[in-house]
Image: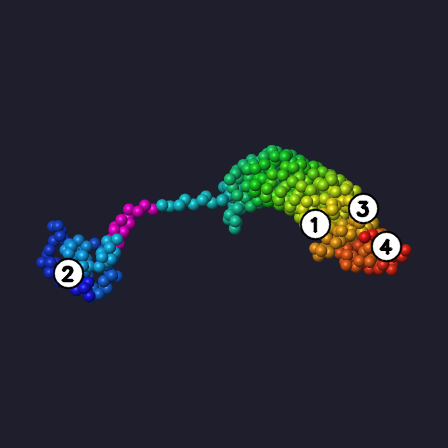
Amino acid sequence: MAILLLLTLLVQASEGERRSGRKKGGKSFKPRKAIRTTLAPIFPVVEDIGEDVVEDVVEDVVEDVDKNIVEDVDKNIVEHISSKTVAEEDAEWIPTFTVAKQPRNVCPPELQYERSGTHPCICRDGLDNQALMIQCVALISAHEMHKIIQGLFGKRINAIEVTNSTLGSMIPQMMGQLYAESIWMRGNKITSTDSLAFQGTEQSVRRLDMESNQLTSVDFLMFNTFTQLQVLNLGENQLRSIENAGNAPSLKVLYLHSNKIESIGPKAFYGLKALEYLDLRWNSLQVIPPTAFEVSSHRWQLRLRSNRISSLRGAFGMDNLPYLVELYGNNIDTLTDAVYGPLTEVALLEGSKIYLGENPIKCDCSIAWLAKNVTLGSTIVGAKCDGDRVPISSIKINDLRNCPLPQT
């Protein structure tokens, strides 16, 4: 009520002065709009008073009201008026800062899809992960590829694919400092790889695919520094032996299918501690030396389909046996308990299988241990007796007469 009474007195006084033509500082009195808009929500009771009167009153409250009267006014109201007025008057002096955006990961102009023309490579951007996709065909040399890669320096590449080219011998740092997650180089007539060909990609590449080339040998030690490499595909080349598959720390999948591999060195894959899948299908393996498949990985599978393997005796270590073995289409004729017993036990624990179809297996006393243990025998898939093609799973112990007791 005290505030309302005060305002009423001030309105009357200001109305009289306004009508008498009172000037302020020799100039016509003009209220400041910022203050008027600030007070509107605080004093809704003055809405019925003429707007020009309210403006005069507001100006007087801020500038010309006697100090003794101001002391009786609620200090919170005065502070609110003052702070709002200063904030609005000074707002124009507050500088505006613009945060610079990171440059968009876009294709180089010469590689953009709609502009590529006769360029051997095209680039696609705008992918979900803001990375680029590069596709090249009909390159004539490793040097040409290196030149193109240099133009992609600093770009984040989801995948680069080079096909149907003639690269020949890969040169040092052919991939430059390319930041790429996947490198696909299928069907490019690559005859050899320099140990430094992929230098600069060690911290980024997850998949390296060099299938369908003409490689006769590969120095696997070059991949030891590849911290992110999980899949390495060297299938459909001309490799003849694997002595040491290196120590790539993250390598999970190694494709060596469809080569001409005849020999494997002792513990050739032992350094691949993350190995989960080893593919040696469609090669020329016959005799597997002791410990060839002794590995340090705890859970892995082995694919040996369509080789000429006659025995796996001693091929594995005492521990870390594969939970799945594919031996379809080899020359295995004897299934001894000493060799295949441990494999069937691991397969049984893992709910997996041992695939032995299309092998000339002798249904003699060597399989008595399977005939007596139907549970272990259930892990053998596709095995049939040589000659009459009777499934081994159907052989009963009574069918094997005069056999010694199975070894324990």
Q: Nearer the viewer, residue 146 or 300?
A: 300
Q: Residue at x 63, y 41 (%)?
A: 248
Q: Residue at x 66, y 39 (%)?
A: 246
| SS for dot 4 | loop
Is 212 part of what is drawn in magenta? no
- Looking at the rendering, which quadrant does residue 347 occupy? bottom right
Specify the amino acid type for callout 3: Ser
x and y, in percent, of residue 215 in the image: 69, 38
Q: CA distance from mark 2 to mark 3?
A: 114 Å
x and y, in percent, of residue 58 in the image: 19, 57
**Mark drawn on residue 10:** 2
Specify the amino acid type for callout 1: Gln
Residue tagged 3: 310
Q: In the drawing, does residue 219 fall left or right of residue 67?
A: right
| SS for dot 1 | strand
Check the image and report above or below for 323 versus 119.
below
The numbered mark, 4 or 3, whose residue comes first in the sequence reads: 3
Question: Can residue 302 be seen in this snapshot?
Answer: no
